[in-house]
Image: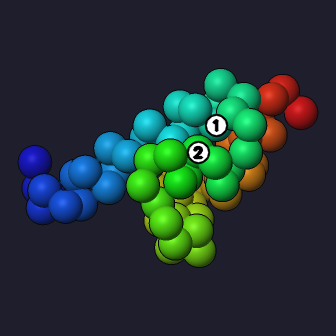
């Protein structure tokens, strides 16, 4: 809906990563790799653009810190 299939799949994977981070995942790197984000700098930039915070900030919130 208003985006390419590639963009939709990337956003969907970002939401899956976010859900794992909010659940208190082991590490940002482990979750990113598990969902197919091989270039961590690109992943981090896309995540911040989508959610307005870094993946590590989300993980900290998920762990209740």
* Secondary structure found at label 1: helix
Question: Of residues 38 and 62, which is closer to you in this image?
Answer: 38
Residue pushed farthest right?
Answer: 65
Q: Position of residue 36 (x, y in %)?
A: 42, 55
Q: Is residue 32 above or below residue 17?
A: below
- How far apart are labels 1 and 2 at the CA level? 8 Å
Location of the C terminus (image quadrant): top right
One can see residue 49 in this view: no
Q: Position of residue 16 (x, y in %)?
A: 44, 37
One can see residue 43 in this view: yes
Question: What residue is drawn where x is 12% and y is 61%?
Answer: 4
- Pair 1/2: label in front: 2
Q: Which residue is mark 1?
A: 21
* Secondary structure found at label 2: helix
Q: Is residue 17 above or below residue 48?
A: above
Q: Position of residue 47 (x, y in %)?
A: 52, 58
Question: What residue is drawn where x is 44% and y is 47%?
Answer: 35
Question: What residue is drawn where x is 49% and y is 66%?
Answer: 38
Query: How busy is the neighbourhood of tag 1: few (under 14 within 10 Å), some, or many (20 plus)?
Result: many
Left or right: 4, with 55 as reference point? left
Left or right: 24, with 20 as reference point? right
Q: Which residue is mark 2?
A: 31
Left or right: 43, with 25 as reference point? left
Question: What residue is drawn where x is 22% and y is 52%?
Answer: 8
């Amino acid at each position: 809906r208003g985006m390419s299939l590639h963009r939709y799949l990337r956003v969907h994977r970002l939401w899956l990563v976010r859900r794992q981070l909010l659940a208190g995942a082991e590490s940002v790197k482990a979750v990113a790799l598990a969902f197919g984000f091989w270039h961590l700098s690109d992943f981090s930039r896309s995540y911040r653009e989508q959610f307005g915070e870094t993946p590590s900030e989300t993980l900290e919130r998920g762990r209740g810190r």
